Amino acid sequence: MSSVDKPKYQINILKTDIEFGCREDQSILHGMGQAGRKGIPSGCHGGGCGVCKIKITAGTYVSGKMNRDVITEEEEASGYKLACKVEPRSDIALEVIGKMRRSYFGA
Ligand code: FES
């Protein structure tokens, strides 16, 4: 099965009209880039810099190792994640915590 056949979930960024599809074998940050969307700030893509911090408010996912200097265990337990280290397992709703560039808001 090629990666193109993998299930694709809808990712919704709350308080914006931004929505994009993301496969379960790619991070939310990667899915956003592949869909040509913006909204979550993008940095190292390796779980280190913390700029892609989000709070997941709905949906299921798996997450990889994250730098404890930028996201504490307590934060992680309350739904805070790094978008470059989270792969969806259902549709996801999230809030962006990292600073968004003004241009991301569009008009
Ligand atoms: S982009 Fe650096 S932690 Fe996600």
Image: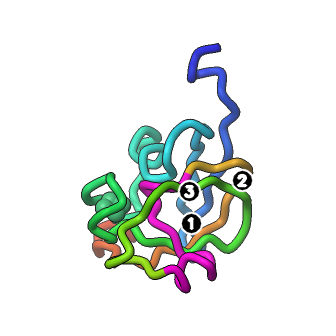
* Cβ at disc 3 under 8 Å from ligand 1: no
Q: Is residue 59 left or right of residue 70?
A: right
Which mark's residue is nearer the viewer, 1 or 2? 2
Q: Amino acid at mark 1?
A: Ile
Front one among 7 and 101: 7
User: In the image, is residue 18 above or below residue 76?
Assistant: above
Q: Amino acid at mark 2?
A: Asp
Question: Which residue extends farthest bottom?
Answer: 74
* Residue 107 in view: no
User: Which image quarter has ligand 1?
Assistant: bottom left
Sort mark 1 into few (<14), some (14-19) or many (20+) by Cα contacts within 10 Å: many
Q: CA distance from mark 1 to mark 2?
A: 11 Å
Q: Is residue 95 left or right of residue 50?
A: right
Mark 1 in CB contact with mark 2 (< 8 angstroms): no
Magenta stretch holds residue 77: yes
Q: CA distance from mark 3 to mark 2?
A: 15 Å
What number is the disc on residue 13? Answer: 1
Magenta stretch holds residue 95: no
- The spot of residue 87 in percent (x, y) is 57, 49
Residue positioned 66% across, 27% down in the render? 6
Q: Which residue is mark 2?
A: 91
Q: Amino acid at mark 3?
A: Ser
User: In the image, is residue 85 above or below residue 93?
Assistant: above
Residue positioned 65% across, 14% down in the render? 1
Q: Which residues are magenta?
A: 73-86
Q: CA distance from mark 1 to mark 3?
A: 18 Å
Asked which quadrant contains residue 52, the reply is bottom left
* Residue 46 in view: yes
Which is more N-terminal, label 3 or label 1?
A: 1
Q: Which residue is mark 3?
A: 63
